[in-house]
Image: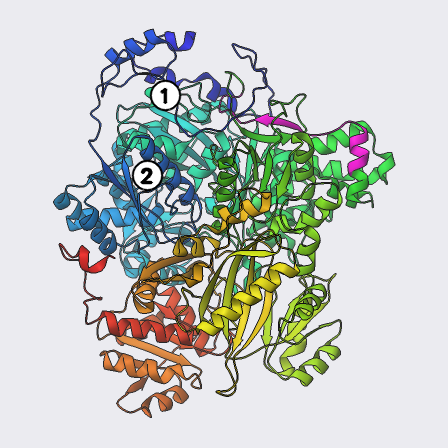
Amino acid sequence: MGLLRLQASITLRRCLETNRSQRFARQLHISRPRFAPVPTKPVRAIARAAVGSYGKDGGEDGDHVLNSPSELARKISAKVLPKIPRPDVKKVLIVGSGGLSIGQAGEFDYSGSQALKALREEGVDAVLINPNIATWQTSHELASEVYFLPITPDYVAYVLEKERPDGILLTFGGQSALNVGIELDRMGVLERLGVQVLGTPIRTLEVSEDRDLFVQALKEIDIPAAQSTAVSSVNDALHAAEKIGYPVILRSAFTLGGLGSGFANNPDELRDLSAKSLSLSPQVLIEKSMRGWKELEYEVVRDAADNTIICCNMENFDPLGTHTGDSIVVAPSQTLPDDEYHMLRSAALKVIRHLGVIGECNIQYALNPTSREYCVIEVNARLSRSSALASKATGYPLAYTAAKIALGHTLPELPNAVTKTTTACFEPSLDYIVTKIPKWDLAKFSSQVNREVGSAMKSVGEVMAIGRTFEESLQKAIRQVDPRWKGFEAYIEPEDLDTALSKPTDMRLFAIAYAMFNKNYTVDQLHDLTKIDKWFLYKIDNIVQTVYALKAAGNVSEIDHQLMKHAKQMGFSDSHIADLVSSTEDVVRAHRKSFGITPFVKRIDTLAAEFPAHTNYLYTTYNASEHDVDFDEHGTMVLGSGVYRIGSSVEFDWCAVTCARKLREMGKRTIMINYNPETVSTDFDEADRLYFEELGYERVMDIYELEQAQGVIVSVGGQLPQNIALRLKQNGVSVLGTDPQKIDSAEDRHKFSKTLDSIGVDQPEWTEVTSVGAAKKFAKRVGYPVLIRPSYVLSGAAMNVVYAEADLEYNLSAAADVSPLHPVVISKFIDNAQEIDVDAVAHKGKLLLHAISEHVENAGVHSGDATLVLPPFSLTDDDMIRLKQIAEKVAFAFEISGPFNMQVIRKPADSPNTEPELKVIECNLRASRSFPFVSKVLGHNFIDAATAAIVDQNVPDPVDAMAEKRDYTAIKVSQFSWTRLAGADPFLGVEMASTGEVASFGKDVHEAYWAALLSTTGFKVPRPNSGVLIGGDITKPEMKTIAQILTNLGFKLYCSSPEVEEFLNDIPYVSAKRIFFPTRDKRKLREVFDEYDIDCVINLAKSRGKDFLDEDYVARRNAVDFGLPLLNNARCALLFVEALAKKIPQGGLRKYTEDTASTKIM
């Protein structure tokens, strides 16, 4: 207790700024002996809620008291700590971030959830506005009221009017919440309603977001910033660049993830870039480019008493020029000498204090690698993606602590909620290395999207790997990004290698591998081309040399103990080693274990083992000599969903968290495995033990054997855990719930089809082909269109609908490339049919619970992109009965115990005397992405029921939730990130493209759809009497009705095609004008849109654009680029204009006015 006793009567700030452990934590390539005052013994980790401060005897209520087990220290601190008045708040509104999009993803579910936990501990009534129904924070366990409404100034103002909270938290909902808060302050709403902004003040938020004010603020304290000029027009941008000199970087203000930012090497590039950026943001900053400099980040925490600590510093593997969200990031920094580290640390403290941040923030630097010259790039005065990474990398609960600070607590009095033994004023120390690698899904968009990465973020998720060496954590991270990758290998063969190295793409790491393995590039050559620090390149070369050593061994029996141990310490997987010596993973695993080489389990304790800490936050490494924990709990393992990607996102994290909580409620110990730093499931208090680890077969088996777990749950984490379920069972693992053999039967088309036939459930005609000729023969027999897909697929990868024989050969080639070991399945595609989702839970083959959701779009749009309506609005009672019967048959046939999901096609009846055909097109014996949606809408937690069924304990009685009548409708709408993916065609098809989802409730389908569509990030309702550009397939029956409604509402109709013009003008009382439509010149097209006041684009094309000059493609793409609403599906467009017709008479296009909450919010 010497440290706490030492200067309890003096300000603690001084010791915080010179924390010993932080000085030693950065250079992990230099091994340093560490000494703890008490020997650290393995202690059983028990997760608790984030509470546990010591009693406040010695101080009166409201006093700030040091969190210490020493009564004397508490009494002294009550007298000497600054008397900071705490905000008097009983009810607080938290503004969420909305649907997951590129640049603003699941990290805000984590941060918002931690803030809600902190509020609950303080006895504060928490109200949340967030339309993202897939998140954990929108579960009623955390907030007393949840509003599934748009994150816009108007809607948040309505909620403030209705709820009348005392305070508002704006820093836990990303850029969306920040922008809304600044606008509400400008509107005077916060002041009029007496709502206090908790934490960082509005003025600080404005200064950090307004580039001009920010640069001025830094000049006041002599902190260097990039030479820059803030501008609001294209001409001003060009003039600024002339003064600064090319190349320049353009940065947008008030945007997230670098949206609209980019590099320009000449006036033409800047003209195009600034025109696009200014359509998305009112202000841009023109800066001198510092491409090639190092980029570093510091996470800073400051309380109202000016206690300030550095939680974590991070270094980008990629030099400046790549957005930090798209860069490989290492924590702590590895290549900074001590003086440079402290130079930037001191500057961070100075900047944050000057700006007046209260809570947590992130500061980014550019550092000249050849000198001590540096400048500040930006400050995020809020929780960010980097904050989530830093929090998980260090074990320091940043969001939780920031929320406590916002409520008036100071760092010395707060306990560290992870360690339970230290205060929040301890700066974390790391005795390991963390590597973050982004996850891109650019391959899903074929050749349309530029694969180069730059200052505007493109990645959809990220992984975090922990190891004791850079090599170990890097190779772990590579495998986490994609299970097909086994480690650092040349997975690509660039045509122009030097360009692939000098211009970063999503695959540059593997271009480096190709250069080293295949072309023998040296570290110096690679550094000259990539500007990546040589320290990282030399570490990568260690991996390369180990590959050569393994290949030289030739076969498994020749790998001795020393080489095997060295390879494992370098991060090689058994499967990777097997490939290098032409063996199998099981043989290598057995050989390794024969040497007694197994991983050790270590704790993340925030203190680098310098003080005793009883955490449950664990990782495995081969660079250790003993375990940090005892294995006497024998818990139940829950496999998480891994990295967020298109097709698997935050909805599966909700499933995993809900499952783990239900298990603990049943009295079972839980073991969570996941490696995604953006998730709630990787929060320190959601499981009894958390392994921040890979979800592959090798690591799951390692943990299962070490923990001697009771069983493994594979059905709540999406497809990733399912893929290893059968192999786990075959190797003696107790896989709980549905038998993996049955899971395999549902995945295998032949077995699945045979099972459906045996129970009398219909399905579309299909066959499996291995040649184009066989495919043509089948298509000719059943008739076009046909759907082609590989046997095993995630999110529609390589699925295509083919309408003519001419397109069949090309599409088959594209599909076969995805899974060359499996033949291609081709099935009859039913045009203009309705698609239905059935989510259900069964126990030992008996249906317990089911939900039936109806798609607004016809079949042909991936269910992950579709608009779901619950309860259904057009299905008959007979349809509902038949769908339930199908679910019962499927549950019985596959002996399901747990969750499952089906997609069903409803083909309308050919005559009044026949019933519609119902055909099952897919069945997943796991939780689906719509489980959070149906659970929250119906008020029945499907995962709670599924967990009980999986472990065969406290199984609920069957309930027909669909038989209950409801006086509301809910609609789930997909969130797309087209703006980020330059060149991608914003077209909906069988290939999934959305990155997130939102949902809203209403009295009817139109009210719910209106609120849900407005909840998607960036959606702007067209102004009254503005122009609407209409195009696409005139055979769509909805186009006529859409044109009539828009005309009646006073909108002006425009088109680019003579065919569409003729069609529209033939409709009675409808008038449309064909306009000049430049397809090659974006600037001229922008002028055309402005000239005709076009505020919305409705494009109902039948297929994707054939090329970049296709008029329909140009209309869709530029609607996105110009920030205009785009309706690209006929049924959704019709629903929108119908909702518009209802909303306009109700004042739906009018802005917020005082005291209107009752008319706007249910």
Query: What x and y, as percent, mark residue 212?
Result: 26, 45
* Mark 2 surroundings within 10 Å by alpha-carbon count, few (fewer than 14), some (14 through 19), many (20 or more): many
Q: Is 592 inside the magenta-drawn segment?
A: yes
Three-letter amino acid code of the residue under disc 1: Ser
* Numbered disc in front, either 1 or 2: 1
Q: Specify whether residue 520 is in view.
A: no
State which quadrant residue 431 falls in: top right
- The disc at residue 381 is 2
Q: Which residue is mark 1?
A: 53
Q: Calculate the distance from the C-alpha at mark 1 to the C-alpha at mark 2.
A: 27 Å
Front residue of 479 and 668: 668
Mark 1 or mark 2: which comes first in sequence? 1
Q: Is residue 646 magenta?
A: no
- Magenta range is 589-608
Q: Secondary structure at mark 2?
A: loop
- Please indicate whether residue 491 sits to the left or right of residue 373 in the image: right
Q: Kindly identify the amino acid type of the residue bearing the numbered disc 2.
A: Ala
**Quarter placement of the C terminus:** bottom left
Pick the front one: 91 or 664: 664
Q: Position of residue 569 (x, y in %)?
A: 69, 31
Q: Dividing the image into 4 quarters, which one contains the N terminus?
A: top left
Q: Position of residue 174 (x, y in %)?
A: 36, 46
Q: Nearer the viewer, residue 718 or 1107?
A: 718
In the displayed structure, 1083 sits above or below 483; it is: below
How many neighbours does mark 1 have within 10 angstroms: few (below 14), some (14-19), or many (20 or more)? some
Residue 757 visible, this orientation: yes
Left of 508 or right of it: where is 396?
Answer: left
- SS at badge 1: loop
